[in-house]
Image (tube, helix red, strand yellow):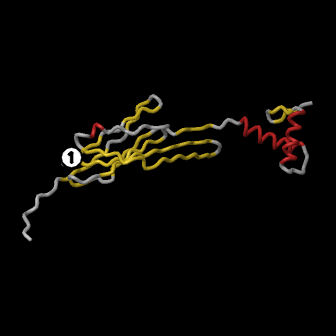
């Protein structure tokens, strides 16, 4: 004997399973509707297809200061978002304008947001570098490129204004 309710066929074995779950959960009301509701909830959780949406990969670069004097250092952050195991960005192209020193990873964050059954996952990994300008002027830091899932992703361009050290008059003490 079986019953067809809300798109699920319940045979005697399923009904027995629902009764067992109801008993295990301490539900006193042995009505079929209570047992069916429990089984339906379990079936929905097991068989229900959750849509997982991964945010698209992105790279954002920031500098700690927009204007510095020649010889001062700035911190350059490369934030790689929504990529699995990204490699350390290669900044060899900056060696004409800056002395580059890798400072390390400053944070690895991930989040999962569930709204109305839609799951959105995002992650972020930030790399930090110390850049010391070698010359004065307005210096542009070109975009950082990364290959993620077969696609090339580029960051924004960062700009730093480097002021020359002002000439000082001779001071007699």
Q: Outermost residue toward the bottom?
A: 173
Vertical side of 26 occupied by 170: above or below: below
The outermost residue toward the top is: 150
Q: In the drawing, does residue 163 fall left or right of residue 103?
A: left
- What is the count of numbered marks? 1
Q: Toward which corner of the image does residue 140 lie, by quadrant?
A: top left
Residue 144 image point, x, y percent: 35, 38
Residue 41 screen position, x and y as percent? 77, 42
Check the image and report above or below for 15 versus 69.
above
Report x, y in % for residue 43.
Answer: 77, 37
Counting from the top left corner in percent of width and height, residue 97 is at 23, 43
**Which quadrant, please, contains the C terminus?**
bottom left
Give the quarter of the figure containing the N terminus. top right
Q: Which residue is mark 1?
A: 134
On the picture, is 138 further left or further right than 48?
left
Residue at 91% of width from left, 46% of height from top? 30
- Horizontal side, residue 114 vs residue 171: left or right: right
The residue at 37%/35% (across/down) is 145
Q: Observer-nearest residue: 47 or 147?
A: 147
Label 1: element kind: loop
Rate crowding at label 1 as few (under 14), some (14 to 19) or many (20 or more) other CA atoms within 10 Å.
Answer: some
């Amino acid at each position: 004997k079986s019953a067809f309710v809300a798109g699920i066929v319940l045979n005697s074995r399923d009904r027995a399973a629902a009764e067992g779950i109801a008993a295990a959960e301490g539900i006193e009301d042995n009505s079929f509707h209570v047992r069916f509701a429990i089984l339906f909830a379990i079936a929905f959780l097991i068989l229900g297809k959750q849509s997982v949406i991964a945010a698209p990969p992105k790279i954002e670069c920031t500098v700690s200061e927009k204007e510095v004097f020649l010889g001062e250092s700035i911190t350059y952050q490369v934030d790689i978002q929504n990529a699995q195991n990204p490699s350390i960005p290669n900044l060899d192209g900056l060696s004409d304008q800056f002395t580059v020193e890798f400072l390390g990873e400053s944070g690895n964050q991930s989040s999962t947001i569930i709204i109305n059954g839609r799951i959105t996952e995002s992650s972020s990994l930030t790399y930090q570098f110390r850049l010391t300008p070698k010359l004065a002027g307005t210096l542009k830091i070109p975009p950082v490129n990364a290959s993620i899932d077969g696609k090339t992703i580029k960051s924004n361009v960062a700009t730093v204004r480097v002021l020359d050290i002002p000439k000082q008059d001779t001071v007699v003490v």
